[in-house]
Image (cartoon, helix red, strand yellow):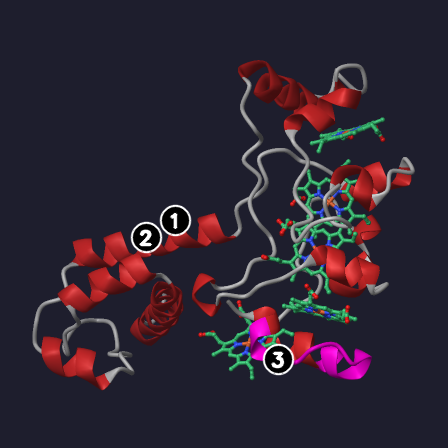
Amino acid sequence: MISRLFVTRVMRLTFALSLAIVRGCPISWLLVQRRGFVRNSPYPILVSDPSVYRRFRGRPLRSRVMTARVLFALVFVAALFAEQPIAYSHRKHLALGLQCLDCHSMADIGPAATIPSVGKCMLCHAMAATDKPEVKKIADYAAKGIEIPWQRVYEFQPHAFVRFNHAAHLHAKVDCATCHGDMTKVDTAQKLVNHNMGTCLSCHRQKGASQDCATCHY
Ligand code: HEC
Ligand code: HEC
Ligand code: HEC
Ligand code: HEC
Ligand code: HEC
């Protein structure tokens, strides 16, 4: 027989996990804040933000709210780990001898490296590997005249107003792998290198590049 204590522990763990997830999701967190928690619910009160607890103490936690929260959290997590629309492979294409700039063709002349358009894929895939299901999807996008909705991998928080420039780095002989890792080992792009102000500045200091705020911020 499963003991009550065991059930409570599992519930506690599930709840702690869902709370952790929910707190990362603005929409579901808002929902939680609006509904609040109750003392004598089967779930322990884990609200570490005292203002939230004080405001909502004593209000019943409805199971529907719990379900909605968990659903929200699941959708949120699914979105976070969303696969790319097409199982593109850096590993396979680089093994064919393609260079980064063949596809990310603006990297040496502009601020953005850019993601290749579906038209560029079709230069080869009008003929190459047309029997593969993932390649058929590319042809579908091209036929409909819509771009493949790739998910971004590297991104700054919009409110940090960061100005980045690929061309400046390539001209200073910083290569792609320094900032993006070994892409020959991955299929769809993965965040192999973390970029934040600290990592930018430590290289800028080392190479004598500008550390002026306005170099990197609007
Ligand atoms: C045949 C074309 C092709 C080649 C060659 C290629 N890429 Fe890509 N790259 C893509 C496509 C398509 C995506 C978008 C899908 C994805 O994220 O994997 C992408 C995405 C990326 C991303 C993620 C961008 C973001 O923030 O969303 C990075 C970084 C990247 N490539 C770096 C490289 C580097 C470095 C090389 C060379 C070693 C390279 N790529 C070669 C097609 C290519
Ligand atoms: C000094 C570090 C650095 C170097 C060198 C670098 N990148 Fe990036 N790359 C970044 C950062 C940071 C971002 C995110 C920029 C943003 O979100 O505005 C990025 C974004 C990208 C993207 C996403 C699309 C875009 O244009 O924002 C691609 C693709 C990419 N890099 C490919 C490359 C390739 C290919 C090379 C080599 C030719 C390269 N990068 C060299 C740091 C670097
Ligand atoms: C220079 C030619 C060329 C370009 C450009 C190119 N590919 Fe490919 N691609 C190939 C070849 C050749 C294969 C077959 C490789 C293999 O089977 O190992 C392939 C295979 C594939 C596959 C099937 C992989 C598998 O084994 O199932 C996908 C998916 C794919 N490419 C997506 C893309 C996308 C998306 C783009 C545009 C960003 C693109 N390719 C651009 C030449 C190219
Ligand atoms: C070499 C480039 C670089 C320089 C120089 C630089 N920053 Fe940043 N800064 C960044 C990057 C990259 C981020 C992180 C953005 C992110 O996390 O998405 C950042 C983040 C920040 C943030 C945090 C934004 C937030 O809310 O998360 C602040 C504030 C900031 N910078 C201020 C400054 C000030 C002030 C200076 C001058 C003393 C400065 N930065 C110089 C690149 C730089
Ligand atoms: C591995 C070293 C390295 C890293 C990491 C690096 N930079 Fe740089 N950066 C340089 C060098 C070298 C220059 C060129 C200095 C020059 O041309 O005088 C430069 C120049 C720049 C410039 C000036 C462009 C121009 O128009 O002159 C900007 C903006 C910039 N970096 C932003 C960033 C940001 C933002 C990050 C972090 C995401 C970053 N850098 C990470 C080495 C680096």
**Numbered mark located on residue 72 in the image:** 2
Q: Are marks 1 and 2 in contact (CB under 8 Å)?
A: yes
Q: Dot 1: within a 10 Å radius of its alpha carbon, few (fewer than 14), some, or many (20 or more) residues?
A: few
The part of the image, by quadrant, that contains residue 182 is bottom right
Kindly tell me whether residue 49 is visible in this rendering. yes
Amino acid identity at mark 2: Phe
**From mark 3 to mark 1, how far is it between C-alphas?**
41 Å
Q: Residue visible at 71% across and 57% down?
A: 166
Residue kind at label 1, given as amino acid type = Val
Pointers 3 and 1 in contact (C-beta within 8 Å) = no
Q: What residue did someone put label 3 on?
A: 212
The percent position of residue 52, horizontal first and vertical second, equals 19, 78
Q: Residue at x 25, y 52 (%)?
A: 68
Decide which of 120, 182 is in the foreground and name it. 120
Between 121 and 205, which is closer to the camera in this rendering?
205
Q: Residue 125 placed where, x, y %?
A: 76, 20
Measured Cα–Cα span from mark 3 to mark 2 = 42 Å
Q: Which residues are magenta?
A: 202-214
Task: Say whether disc 3 or disc 1 marks the residue closer to the N-terminus.
Answer: 1
Marked residue nearer the N-terminal end (3 or 2): 2
